[in-house]
Amino acid sequence: MMTSPATPSTLIADVQTVAIKAYSDERGRFMETFRREWFPSINWDKIQCNRSESKQGVLRGLHYHFWQIDYWYVISGTIRVGMVDLRPASPTYMATQTIEIGEQNNVGVFIPVGVAHGFVALTDTVLTYLVNNYYSGEDERGVAWNDPTINLNWGIDNPIVSERDQRNRLLKDIPADELPG
């Protein structure tokens, strides 16, 4: 059995990064970007893989889930991931973290249930992400990307944000029963 290459975040409990090794020669590169065994405590029976393409300046999020985790890997480009722990029972409740991933930082990011997450595309970007449950609109919720209580440093003043994400409420305006328990 292989030892997991996942490294726990020092800022948000249960968030992990995985350094991806690239093997290059004159033909190109090979990388193993995901293995179930890297995250042995997660049930991956209902795995779904998604691809997101974003133009530079696009900001997606902040989204959170009640029963789905995410594992992100950037195929091309660079993103700044923003996260906030919305789990009241977590030792890192309301802690935030940003991390740049992509061509200059070749890592995967594991995002647990209850951690709101989003990203801003610093370049034109292709992101793949695995989830451990099939998509359900009932499971996806949102909080305003620019919520002053959360105060994430996105490093961008006027991002391109979807109409749906523009409607995300401030944390103080979301009823407790609509937040992670």
Image (spheres, rainbow, N blue to C red):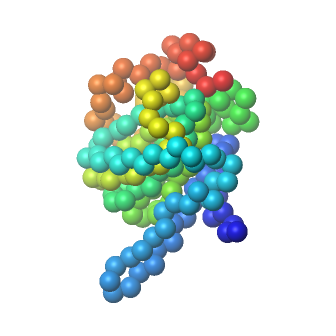
- Above or below residue 114? Residue 167 is above
Report whether 179 appears left or right of 137: right
Q: Is residue 79 shown to the viewer in this render?
A: no
Front in this rendered view, residue 29 or 58: 29
- Above or below residue 41? Residue 19 is below
Query: How many discs appear?
Result: 0
Q: What residue is shown at x 29% (from left), y 46% (from top)?
A: 54
Q: Which residue extends farthest bottom?
A: 26
Q: What residue is shown at x 42% (from left), y 64% (from top)?
A: 104
Residue 102, percent from left and from top: 41, 59
Front in this rendered view, residue 128 or 79: 128
- Above or below residue 171? Residue 73 is below
Q: What residue is shown at x 47% (from left), y 23% (from top)?
A: 138
Image quadrant where residue 161 sits: top left
Residue 4, percent from left and from top: 66, 63
Q: Which residue extends farthest front?
A: 45
Front in this rendered view, residue 104 or 46: 46
Q: Is residue 109 shown to the viewer in this render?
A: yes
Front in this rendered view, residue 24 or 56: 24
* Quadrant (top left/top right/bottom left/bottom right) for the N terminus: bottom right
Q: What residue is shown at x 56% (from left), y 12% (from top)?
A: 175
Residue 44, percent from left and from top: 57, 48
Report whether 163 appears left or right of 175: left
* Quadrant (top left/top right/bottom left/bottom right) for the C terminus: top right
